[in-house]
Image (cartoon, rainbow, N blue to C red):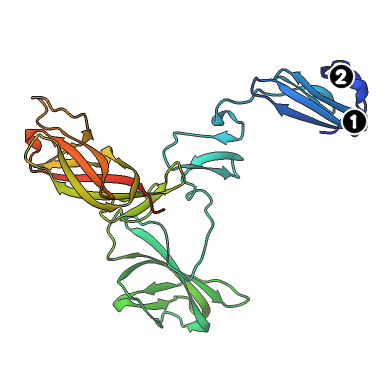
């Protein structure tokens, strides 16, 4: 903000120091933690610093004006609208409402990207992952009316085509709809216009026969999916910047309520934890949750399995005690950890 050289009587917030201001002086306003605003002015008239006013006033080129207090919540900002936030959501700008709104970040005005590599782009109605891939011909190919064209492309696995998009040339680059097939793992195209068209590329959307519903990277709501696995996987970053790993293990409990241990094959752990809400033991048709280790089981604790994790010989060790109803039962336990080698 630059002082305009007039209306000095309105700059009462400088408390008698107005005569040090000249036209062209830069005025800087800095909100302070105690709710006041520090005003600094610097220019040809010298320097004025550390003049503090309350949070409802500010000096601008017209004199004294009102400004709102600093909001205490992000949603209090005029250009932010947050509704029922869930873990994993981000703020994305909506040009229609002109507000920053919460969402997955991928279901709001996501860029359209065509790639020669397979991309997972969503979820189909059957819950299977939806993929997209673009194929480019070596020059133009002609699709005759109502006649199948063999692209010569052979697939390495069975796919279920969802839709095809073609880039067609006809009468000054007009685009036409095409259809296709993946019978016998070969891609064929067809178009139903009454005249032939030429295309140089096409994009196919498809699911895979080998996939199972819910196995993709996204949920039907557009939120990133989390998949538990008996294979080690990277799930994020710990607060100290180290890579955070996750693995789900299985073992059978002992037949004693004494202090028992199970040594996993997870090596070089640093920080580690049991994900209790993703850990349980199997008792017939029941799945009974594991609880943090307390060290003592009472006479009414027959269904309890309490556990903690420790380091033993460079591996994660599970220390646990079980009640009588939890003897010789299968345990499913999810662990998260960082590594000393990272």
Quadrant of the frame with the N terminus:
top right
Are the residues at dot 2 and dot 1 in contact (C-beta closer than 8 Å)?
no
* Left or right of 64 in this view: 245: left
Q: Residue 10 carries which label?
A: 2
61, 147: nearer the viewer: 61
201, 47: nearer the viewer: 47
The residue located at (42%, 77%) in the rendering is 190
Q: Position of residue 154 (x, y in %)?
A: 36, 80
Which class describes the residues within 10 Å of circle 1: few (<14), some (14-19), or many (20+)?
A: some
Separation of residues labelled 2 and 1 (CA atoms): 12 Å
In the picture shown, does residue 300 fall above or below 200?
Answer: above
- Is residue 223 at all visible to an observer of this figure? no
Residue to which mark 1 is pinned: 4
Helix, strand or loop status at disc 2: helix
The residue located at (57%, 39%) in the rendering is 100
The residue located at (52%, 83%) in the rendering is 138
207, 76: nearer the viewer: 76
The residue located at (51%, 71%) in the rendering is 176
Q: Where is residue 174 in the image (x, y as percent from the top left)?
A: 58, 72
Helix, strand or loop status at disc 1: loop
- Is residue 19 at all visible to an observer of this figure? yes
């Amino acid at each position: 903000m630059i002082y305009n050289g007039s209306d000095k009587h309105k700059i009462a917030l400088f408390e008698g120091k107005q005569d040090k201001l000249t036209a062209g002086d830069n005025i800087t306003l800095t909100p302070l933690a105690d709710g006041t605003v520090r005003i600094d002015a610097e220019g040809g008239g010298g320097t004025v610093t550390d003049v503090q006013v309350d949070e409802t006033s500010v000096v601008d080129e017209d004199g004294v004006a009102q400004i709102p207090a600093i909001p205490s919540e992000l949603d209090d900002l005029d250009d932010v609208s947050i509704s029922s936030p869930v873990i994993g959501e981000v703020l994305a700008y909506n040009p229609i409402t002109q507000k920053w709104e919460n969402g997955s970040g991928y279901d709001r005005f996501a860029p359209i990207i065509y790639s020669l590599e397979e991309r997972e782009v969503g979820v189909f109605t059957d819950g299977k992952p939806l993929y997209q891939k673009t194929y480019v011909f070596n020059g133009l190919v002609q699709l005759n009316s109502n006649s199948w064209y063999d692209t010569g492309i052979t697939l390495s696995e069975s796919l279920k085509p969802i839709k095809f998009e073609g880039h067609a040339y006809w009468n000054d680059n007009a685009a036409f709809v095409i259809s296709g097939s993946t019978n016998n793992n070969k891609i064929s195209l067809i178009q139903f216009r009454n005249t032939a068209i030429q295309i140089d590329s096409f994009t196919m959307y498809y699911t895979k026969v080998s996939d199972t519903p819910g196995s993709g990277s996204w949920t039907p709501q557009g939120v990133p999916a989390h998949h538990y696995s008996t294979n080690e996987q990277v799930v994020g970053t710990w607060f100290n910047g180290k890579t955070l790993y996750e693995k789900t293990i299985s073992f059978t409990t002992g037949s004693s309520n004494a202090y028992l241990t199970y040594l996993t094959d997870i090596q070089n752990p640093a920080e580690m934890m049991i994900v209790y809400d993703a850990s349980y033991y199997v008792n017939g048709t029941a799945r009974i949750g594991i609880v943090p280790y307390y060290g003592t089981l009472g006479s009414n604790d027959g269904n309890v399995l309490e556990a903690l994790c420790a380091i033993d010989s460079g591996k994660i060790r599970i220390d646990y005690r079980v009640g009588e109803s939890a003897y010789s039962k299968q345990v499913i336990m999810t662990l998260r950890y960082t590594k000393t080698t990272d």
